[in-house]
Amino acid sequence: MRKAILALSLIAALAPAAAMAKKPPAKPKSATYALKGTLSSFVAPSGDQAGSVTIAVSGGNKAGRAFAGQTLTFAVAATTDEEDDCDGVISDGEDGSVVVKAPAGATADQLQAATPQAVEDDSSDDDDQGCDGDGGGGGEG
């Protein structure tokens, strides 16, 4: 009987120490995935209806390069920053980028479940023809 009481006392003494040793779960680390490639099937969001964009990934930042060779589709929200080129539209086949924040080490499915922070049409970054304010690119001249 004495051994049982001693064992229970020992357990009771150690239980609060074990409970205090538990740390709250760490927040999962996130990463910014800057995906570069060819854009297609862009649909702008309208009202509360989400849009979408598809990118055939050819490269990106360190996190984004893991998806090179894959074609990914994202839901585009009204909060997504859309940057088109000087023609005013994001057209199929144009070079561009999609920037997404997701858990570090995300799979393609996890990445596609995240809403992009930005979609950018990079097709005229090297060639600004029609973007000099002379009426080209659909602007008023």
Image (cartoon, rainbow, N blue to C red):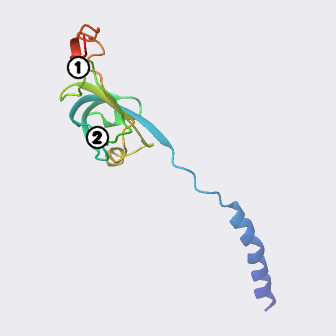
Q: Is residue 70 visible?
A: no
Q: Quadrant of residue 122?
A: top left
Reading the image, the residue beneath label 1 is 87
Examine the rendered structure and indicate whether residue 117 appears above or below residue 89: below
Would you place residue 88 above or below residue 24 in this image?
above
Viewer-nearest residue: 129 or 60: 129
Between 12 and 40, the one nearer to me in the picture: 40
User: Residue 33, position in %: x, y?
Assistant: 40, 35
The percent coordinates of residue 13 (x first, y second) are 78, 73
Q: Residues within 10 Å of mark 1 (few under 14, many from 20)?
A: some
Q: Position of residue 23 (x, y in %)?
A: 65, 57
Sequence order check, earlier mark of 1 and 2: 2
Q: How far, Cα to Cα, is label 1 from label 2?
A: 19 Å
Q: Residue at horizontal 69%, vertical 66%?
A: 19
Quadrant of residue 108 in the image?
A: top left
Q: Amino acid at mark 1?
A: Asp
Identified by mark 2, the residue type is Pro
* Numbered mark located on residue 11 in the image: none
Q: Is residue 17 left or right of residue 106?
A: right
Mark yes or no: residue 134 visible: yes
Residue 126 in percent (x, y) is at 29, 12
- The quarter of the displayed image where residue 136 is located: top left
| Residue at numbered disc 2 | 45
| Residue depicted at x 44% and y 36% | 32
